[in-house]
Image: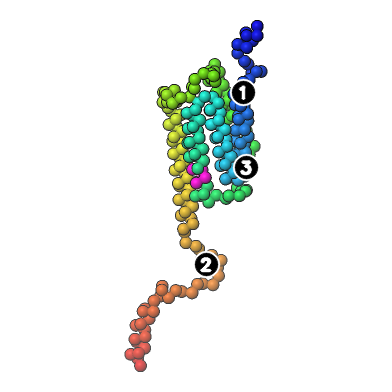
Amino acid sequence: MILAAAAAPHGFLSPTGVEIAFLLFGLVTFGAALVTVTTKQLVHAALWLVVTLGGLAVEYLLLTAEFIAWVQVLIYVGSVVVLLLFGLMLTRAPIGRSPDADSGNRWVALAVALAAAAALVWVVTDAFRTTWVDLNGPAAGSTAVTGASLFQNWVLPFEALSVLLLAALVGAIVLSRKAKAESSSPPVNSRAATGGSPSVPDSRIHPVGRNKPAEQEQEGAR
């Protein structure tokens, strides 16, 4: 009886150490994601995004998807977050607390986020209801298995994601060029804008050489 009880599969009331670690890292990732979207400091939001993406990488490692975990670290943590920080620097975004980072539509945004999360959970649960990952078996996220699944079943979402990243890169370039053009524009004359006294004419605009014929006429009259 003891051997039969030991060989019986565990259920939700008897989780393994890997499942407990998965739950704990999931809570940390969820908390970091909440801080990312609620903080009023853009640089802090980018740094908390690093924690969120790193937590997702750990979750992939616990699901024996080593290749996806390292791709998560190299591409998202090492490239996308760096691109976001460079975009903040190029657009001269405020470093400290910014009142512009807050919006009066926070409750509408919260309702939309909850609806999107519920829809995503329902779709994933319905699609992978009968799929189980053997954490004690061989790694299911090897390069060969991931490549075959990616370019056979998920090629369209993969291309859509690449177009989205390209659009984000182009948008960052456009915003940086616009800020550079505004900073290099000539200043407006404050006196002319406020209706003050007219400015003194520049001698370079009215050269002295133009008065030479009048001076010659006066000398001839003498």
Most common SS among magenta residues: helix
- Residue 207 point in image, percent of width and height: 39, 76
Q: Which residue is mark 1?
A: 17
Which residue range is magenta in the image? 83-87
Q: Which residue is mark 2?
A: 192
Residue depicted at x 62% and y 12%: 6
Location of residue 111 (image quadrant): top right
Residue 39's disc is 3
Mark 3 neighbour class, 10 Å CA radius: few under 14, some 14 to 19, many 20 or more: some
Mark 2 neighbour class, 10 Å CA radius: few under 14, some 14 to 19, many 20 or more: few
Residue in the foreground of this view, choosing between 126 and 20 = 20
Which of the image's four quarters has the C terminus? bottom left
Mark 1 neighbour class, 10 Å CA radius: few under 14, some 14 to 19, many 20 or more: few
Residue 53: tell me if it is visible: yes
The disc labelled 2 sits on which kind of residue?
A: Ala
Residue depicted at x 50% and y 42%: 82
Which of the image's four quarters has the N terminus? top right
